[in-house]
Amino acid sequence: MAAKTKKAIIDVSKQLDKVAAHYTTFQVLNEEGELVDKSFMPDLTDDQLKDLMTRMVYTRILDQRSISLNRQGRLGFYAPTAGQEASQIASQFALEKEDFILPAYRDVPQLIWHGLPLYQAFLFSRGHFHGNQMPEDLNALSPQIIIGAQYIQAAGVALGLKKRGKKAVAITYTGDGGASQGDFYEGINFAGAFKAPAIFVVQNNRFAISTPVEKQSAAKTIAQKAAAAGIPGVQVDGMDPLAVYVAVREARDRAVNGEGPTLVETLTYRYGPHTMAGDDPTRYRSTELDNEWEKKDPIVRFRKFLEAKGLWNEEEENKVIEQAKEDIKEAIKKADDYPKQKVTDLMDIMYEEDMPFNLKEQYEIYKEKESK
């Protein structure tokens, strides 16, 4: 009996290897910006390709300026995005306006390209309540600070879309660290059980805050975790914007056609620290590894592809850079000029109906102080 049990365990171990081998990395462009297979090329016009590149370059400049503004004390909380442009921007590019975005704290760029005014993104960084007030025509929730909590929310939003008969999806993001949270499993399992139109993106940048992905889970890929929820999982080259676009667009098509959710793992890399709140990536990442991933830079790769097609050049890119700088300058000024947040503002928006009597007393005290 013991021998049979031992053999069964060995066979299960072999099955795990087979499962991991099933989840190969999907790629459209190699590191030199060349198509690995012409049949993989998405049906995008030249203008759409240029638009995608424009958004990625703009976002890189936004990241650089945001880091500078943070260091100057003009922004508050900020999580760098450089290196993850393909994963973030190309995934949002695959959406439609009616789709809902449930972002994590690093996913402000997706909100901006979905319709969040830039000055409000700056106010969010400063902790101003207006930075969390999504415009009426923007289907999105505020960036989630709690790791993985947005996965459960996305399952609920997606089910709501389904029950209302909407041809739209809810897409949410987390990092590799978020895939170790209980909310991650609950979210994908619930959405899978009800075939909710959700897209769950895990941006695997390898280190969460500071822990290597190999120490976070024994699973060879995060994509294979989808199997436990009975939903499709796909792993893509997260430094390849076209691969990310194809994966998310196909996931969206499946979702709106009633086929349920998809888990998309993007293999990417953040060049900077986890956040600007004192993280030092040199303590857990080597210079050699940084250099290895910088060779896979999504903007460099896509630039090579577009230049070979005659769709991009240095002049075009410089125009985008200058426009980004000008927009950022105007947006930070608008954020500076926006009415300062008051304690009574927070109390006003906390309650839909009358607030408790003890808070009313405090409210009057603060109101009097604020009027002086």
Image (cartoon, rainbow, N blue to C red):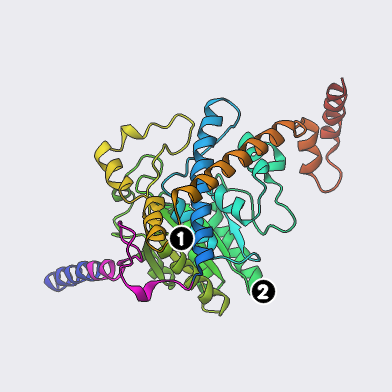
Q: Position of residue 263 (x, y in %)?
A: 44, 65
Identity, as a three-letter code, of the amino acid under mark 1 = Leu
Q: Is residue 144 left or right of residue 134?
A: left
Q: Position of residue 284 (x, y in %)?
A: 31, 36
Q: Is residue 241 left or right of residue 294?
A: right
Q: Judge whether residue 114 can be spotted in this image.
A: yes
Residue pointed to by mark 1: 311
Q: Is residue 239 left or right of residue 104?
A: left
Q: Is residue 114 left or right of residue 104?
A: right
Badge 2 density bin: few <14, some 14–19, many ≥20, Cα 10 Å:
some
Pick whichever of labels 1 and 2 is earlier in the sequence: 2
- Disc sitting over residue 42 in the figure: none
The one of 255 and 331 positioned closer to us in this rendering = 331
Which structural element holds mark 1?
loop
> For the point 80% across and 45% down, which residue is it?
351
> For the point 50% across and 51% down, which residue is it?
316
Task: Give above or below for 267 relative to 251.
Answer: above
Q: Judge whether residue 186 can be spotted in this image.
A: no
* Residue 312, magenta (yes or no): no
Magenta region: which residues? 17-43
Number of labels in the image equals 2
> For the point 48% across and 55% down, which residue is it?
53
The one of 26 and 156 positioned closer to us in this rendering = 26
The one of 358 and 147 positioned closer to us in this rendering = 147
